Amino acid sequence: MAVVPLAVVSVLSGLRVTASAQQIGDSRSDRSLIRLAIRLTDLAHSLEEERDLTSRYLADAGNRDSRPDPSGSGIALNRPRQSVDTLIDGTAHLAESEHDLPEIGARQGDLVKETLPKTLSTLRHAVDESQGTFPVSAALRAYGDAIATLIDGLEGLTSATSDPALAERLRTVTALSFGEESISLQRALVAVALEKGTLDTQEQEKLTNATAKRSAMLDYFLVVAEPSERLAYENTVTGRDVDESERIRLLLTNHLAGLTPDGKRSAKVADPRLWYRSITGTTELSRQVRKQIETKVLSAVSAQVNSSIQDTASNSVVLILLLTLTIVVTRSVARSITTPLRSLRSTALNIASTGLPTTVRRLENVQGEPPELDVTPVPVEGTDEIAEVARAFDTVHAEAVRLAVEQSRLRAAVNAMFVNLARRNQSLVQRQLQLIDTLENSERDPDQLENLFLLDHLATRMRRHGEGLLVLADAESYRGQRAPALLLDIARAALGEVEGYKRVAVGSMPETHLASGIIDDTVHLLAELLENALRYSDTASFVEIHARLVDHGDALVEVTDYGLGIAPETLDGINQRLELPGRPDVETSRQMGLFVVARLAARHGMRVALRSSLSLGTVAEVRIPAAMLQSKLPRRIPGSPIAQPPTLQASPMQEATIDSPEGEAISTTVAGEATATDTLPVRVRGSDLVPGSVPESNTSSRGANRSPEAIRAQLSQFHRGLRDGRRHVSTGPHGERQENHPKENP
């Protein structure tokens, strides 16, 4: 029970520390504001001096020939200008370096850094270029606006302070700064009047207003200032310079006698240099009082910051001690709870990260009926709440394992159904192909024979789709191929299993044989890629397939289409699925062909990847490891040569010769490369056999050795040529339409 009061005390101490930290932040912010305010008052004072000297310089335009100053006047402007520029840089640097400066201070710093230099540069350039002809009133007005902006910013900084007493002290500085501005304006106006010898009505009004404003600011200072500050002002702002400047001002005011013909009054009553020296001395005395007050205010706020830091440190020490005591007290209470919790946590993490995933993976790889699995309980004993949580976790763990076993059984059942359906489909398709072969052997009509060829091709495609179910079920399918085969023959076999085979052009192929154990799966894989390329490309374009040997003796087969291509992000996702096929899911039903390709490639260590073509379309790359390839074997005479695919024109029929047992050449005409107008290639019995692997039959008659397939191929070619000739006659030699003639019997 001692934990609760200790916790309450800790919270209260924390709140105290937070309040102290907030006070430190406010004090530091106030200190930054005061530092910036002091810089602004110094900058305003220096800018006032530049204004007054500039006005004297412009008023002294008639006496410059005998003056040593490079500007043509005895009044030097470089020193006050350099002083102003130095203070501008210092003020801007201070505003940037004070990290505790509030937003209003940062805005004032930006004004001094960016706006004020541009204004002064323009004004100075105009004064210098005018050679003393720049209007004095315009210069006074421009400088007055810049000074007013600085003093207004000083008022804003005073309002932003968080301590009311500190703000009150800062207002005394503002009052003195306003008073110095009034004295400076008097200095400029009287100096101009004494230099020119005249004082017009407008300038007299400005002088009167400046005198009244100085008196008002002095009264305000005496109200807000502390007694010591008032006494310091009265003892400091006195003496010969103060009396002399006041005497000259009153003399100028009292001797403003009658108007001259040009509407101005005579002002030649005193020496301008005497006036400027005495009034400047008065300004410096007022500035001394202001600097004393600024130093006092800055010291006060710095002491406040240090006090806040000390309070925060002491409160932090008390808080640490209380927290330490709380930890010591609660540790003994929590020890009896942490041990079983630690055991529960480690067991749960081990099951979640290692145990359960390992069990699920083992069940995924189980062939047949999955075994029954027991769950090891969490080693936490007792009847408290932690033990109840442990027993609940054991129940959840057991249920998860049971669901994994059920899922494994369901997956095995689905795979068995897939395999059963695929085997049935294979059996029916194989019987269908045998029936089609029988019908082809007995058919003599070339048109019907061509239809049977189309039906044969359709059944072959059905067989491939059925084998896709076996791949989904992770079962293997063999078509009885045992001898190694050339890559060219494998590519042609893949052509026979796609619908748009006429649009496929077979490119160069190395004379490399593929091992017998992977021929069926390689044909299936290439057929899926070809069908995908044909489906997603324009029907007027063609698809290329070629192969080459690459490094390490591997074979690289490329299937290129000229479709619209695939977006890069989609292409990356497809390549990831090709590299790691995983288990069948919902996505598999939409892209079953790619899943089959990935499964077949993973089964034999091949690598399949898609990439964008350099020009247009997509390239599918199949990398066959060198271990799957074999050295040269006795090469059979291929059924058709490699065709070149520059265009989609109908390629001519080509003939291949096979030596008969009697040494005579039997001509078997086969289709060239499949194009947009070719018919199906003719299948020749025994064309895939290696010469010498089948005993030759002894026949004496040349006609008896000619196979029915060869005769049918010649008749089919003859009929195809006759039909093309009729089409040519009906459309004309140049494509024009002719009159139809009665169809002749072949």
Image (cartoon, rainbow, N blue to C red):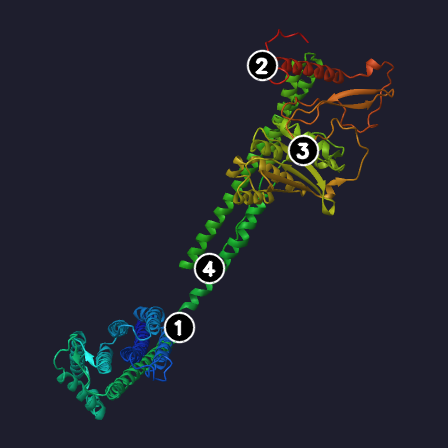
Q: Residue furthest front?
A: 261
Residue 617, position as x, y percentages in the image: 58, 38
Q: Nearer the viewer, residue 581 or 618?
A: 618
Q: Is residue 103 above or below residue 179?
A: above
To which residue does mark 3 refer?
523
Q: Is residue 381 left or right of residue 134?
A: right
Residue 111, position as x, y percentages in the image: 32, 69
**Amino acid type assigned to the residue bearing label 3 in the image:** Val
* Secondary element at tag 4: loop
Of badges 2 and 4, nearer the viewer stands 2
Residue 604, position as x, y percentages in the image: 67, 41
Image quadrant in which you'd find residue 191: bottom left
To which residue does mark 2 refer?
737
Q: Earlier in the sequence, mark 4 or mark 3?
A: 4
Res 473 visible: no
**Amino acid type assigned to the residue bearing label 4 in the image:** Glu
* Secondary element at tag 1: helix
Q: Earlier in the sequence, mark 1 or mark 4?
A: 1
Q: Is residue 110 above or below residue 740?
A: below
Residue 327, numbered label: 1
